[in-house]
Amino acid sequence: MFALLKREVLLSIRAGGGTLTGVLFFLAVVSVFPFAVGPDTKLLSHLAPAILWIGALLASLLGLDKLFAQEREDGSLDLLVMQSHPLSITIFIKAFAHWLMTGLPLVLATPLFGIMLNLSPLGIGATMITLLAGTPAISFIGAVGAAVSVKLPRGGMLISILVLPLVIPILIFGVAAITGALEDPAPFTAPFLFVCAITLFTSVLGPLAASIMLRHSAD
Amino acid sequence: MSTETIKPSIWAFANPTRFNAFANKAIPVFAVVTFILLTIGLWMSFNAPEDYQQGYTVLIMFIHVPAAWLSMMTYSVMCVSAIGTIVWRHPLADVSLRSAAPLGAMFTVLALATGSLWGKPMWGTWWEWDARMTSVLVLLIIYLGLIALAKAFDEPSEAALPLAVMTLTGAPLLPIIKWSVDWWNTLHQPASVSRFDRPAMAPEFLYPLLVMALAYMAIFFTLHMMSMRNEILARRIRTMKMQAARERKSGGGS
């Protein structure tokens, strides 16, 4: 299992266009917002948590279509399916590797973008924690979308349409938690725990659903 | 038809021909029931008294609320079909899921559109990002995504499992829609019919609403069955076309 994780991570680093593209895309999305809403720092700092979360959401969707597609093309998907390990654990590892390569860099890049958007240090901390807790769920739900559309030659767009409505709850609770940290009456703990709960929930059910799907499409 | 006796179970309809024979008989009955219920329901709706606050606009309720209920019931039907596909590989479950999706999308559009028309005179706004409306909008996006997914596959039978898995993945949305009015206290009013104690609605409004709900359900079952029959026939035509193409190829040449 560790070997698989290592393979996935190495592949995405050495094959190029993995980690860095995600962060670049994140930067692009974040820097487009000030052009659209105007460079008013007060407004931007108010919008910053939402902008960062939307950017992270869109950046995490990148590369989801390749999660299983390349393995299917070169045939190694069949090998993964026929292993003695439960397939859902294999998928869990693959989704986790996807998060390590897309989600985690975004979390690490958040302080920089937070400063650019005039977010307070407390807000940056809250955004990092909620992104850290929430973005894995995007990868786990995305694994289902990737497995469903693995047979489609042009599945990339479709995955985004299928996955985006399902990750809206994470977005809601993530931004609610940041707002709770910044403004006094709103609670931080409750929405944050919801984010954690969604991530744990999807980490079990996402790989399970994807494994049902992949076992079917491997024949 | 053969005169063999079949145990009356869901598996009797695994044979598409048998299902279509049943559908051919059942659809006219359902259509008549729909017509009668709809006539009674509309008559009762238009004879309902004016609300002391809302005036005539309360009549919108009789088409809005059943549409919203049906948009969720259709998704429940699709979830049951999805379980039928994943667990039992029932051949009709996929047909049922696929033909229910456009109907569900239509009911959702109807609920959103009539709600918007009702919201303008009552709340002073066409649209508000309130919990109930937003979650129903998400439901519509999921319906449209599922329809797009169903159409993306070249071979209809290959779409069966992807559709089923994706449908069940979206299922947690149903309880969110149901209780969104209680969890987030925003614009849309909480449930006033499906409560454990007595409904908080005067009977002169409640009865037309219930009849209309039954009429909507009858519409759904009629259209669903027609659509399933069409889907079965369309697949048969597809198979025959491919067979004809294969014969032409093997007969006519090299």
Image (cartoon, coloured by chain):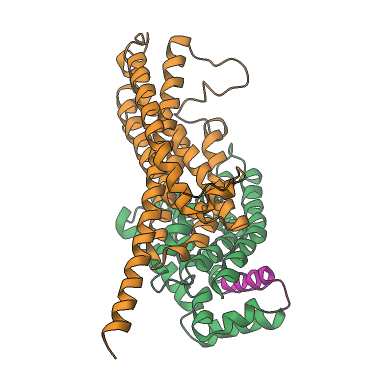
Residue A99 located within the stretch drawn in magenta? yes
> Quick one: A105 or A86, which is closer to the camera?
A86
Q: Position of residue B168 (x, y in %)?
A: 56, 52
User: In this view of the protein, can residue B128 be seen by the observer?
Assistant: no
Q: Residue B241's image quarter?
A: bottom left
Please give the letter of the chain rendered in green: A
Residue stretch in magenta:
A84-101
Furthest toward the right, the residue is A84
Furthest toward the bottom, the residue is B254
Q: Position of residue A20 (x, y in %)?
A: 48, 78
> Which residue occupies 53% across, 75% down?
A68
> Which residue occupies 43% across, 33% down?
B68
User: In this view of the protein, can residue B22 be seen by the observer?
Assistant: yes
Please give the letter of the chain rendered in orange: B
> Which residue occupies 43% across, 45% down?
B21
Image quarter of the C terminus of chain B: bottom left
> Which residue occupies 36% across, 28% down?
B32
Question: Can you say whether B37 is above or below A194 in the image?
Answer: above
Question: Can you say whether A34 is above or below B26 in the image?
Answer: below
Which secondary structure class fits the magenta region best?
helix
Question: Can you say whether B226 is above or below B123 in the image?
Answer: below
Q: Position of residue A180 (x, y in %)?
A: 58, 44
Question: Can you say whether A178 is above or below B120 in the image?
Answer: below
> Quick one: B70 or A160, which is closer to the camera?
B70
